[in-house]
Amino acid sequence: MGCTEKSNTELHTIVAEQRRRKALGNRYDSNFVSIPKSPDTTLSGALRHNRCMNKTSPNAAEWFEIPTADIAKSIPFYNQVLGLQMEAVEFGPNQIAILPHEKPSSGGCLMQGAGMVPSAFGSVVYLSVTDMDGTIARVEPAGGKVVVPKTPIGPNRGFFARFLDLEGNVVGLCSLA
């Protein structure tokens, strides 16, 4: 199945609302969870999709956005944990901080804007790191929490770990060592 004509925002909103309701169970309150009615101004909504953007690997992840309600707080956290020097930049009505990547690799960013709601529910983005032990060691001093320690994937396949960032997003790490 290829990309459809249905708006990414409409599909994302429907799925996100279903996940939130399921996660909150009886605690669901329509006043607590708000769905913005504004147009999708995220990079995934702004870029013209051509075969879901990736021509060589049609099912490969092309771009990701880690939601943040406070990008000024999130940037120093990710800079400290990952050893980066990201800065916020305007992208339409949003603020983003792009994680360094080289083409043709997939890329992504931190994003603050309408509809960007941090959550521990939903997809998990895995970031490749060269020093898993050092990266994990920086999570808690930066204010995060390691929720899955360094775990072997299998023989000669490397390791993974997961942490909660300052706003409750679950983010994965992967490395060969």
Image (cartoon, helix red, strand yellow):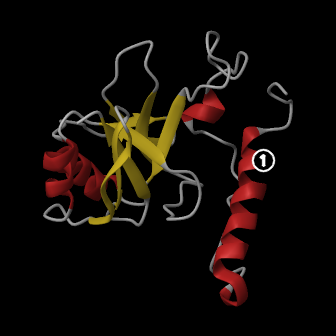
Residue farthest along the bottom direction in this orientation:
26
Question: On the image, which quarter does residue 85 sit in?
Answer: top left
Residue 133 in sight from this viewpoint: yes
Residue 16 placement, left or right of 133:
right
**Number of on-image labels:** 1
Residue 92 placement, left or right of 90:
right
The residue sitting at 21% across, 58% down in the picture is 139
| Residue 169 picture location, percent across and down | 43, 60
Residue 62 placement, left or right of 134:
right
| Residue 37 picture location, percent across and down | 73, 56
The residue sitting at 14% across, 56% down in the picture is 137
Question: On the image, which quarter does residue 29 sit in?
Answer: bottom right
- Residue in the foreground of this view, choosing between 104 and 70: 104
| Residue 103 picture location, percent across and down | 41, 13
In the image, residue 60 above or below residue 6: above
Q: Quadrant of the C terminus?
A: top left
Residue 32 placement, left or right of 63:
right
In the image, residue 70 above or below residue 96: below
| Residue 66 picture location, percent across and down | 45, 48
Q: Amino acid at mark 1?
A: Leu
Quickly name the residue at label 1.
Answer: 11
The residue sitting at 50% across, 65% down in the picture is 120
Q: Quadrant of the N terminus?
A: top right
Crowd class of label 1 (few under 14; some 14 to 19; many from 20; radius 10 Å): few
Residue 37 in sight from this viewpoint: no
**Helix, strand or loop under label 1:** helix
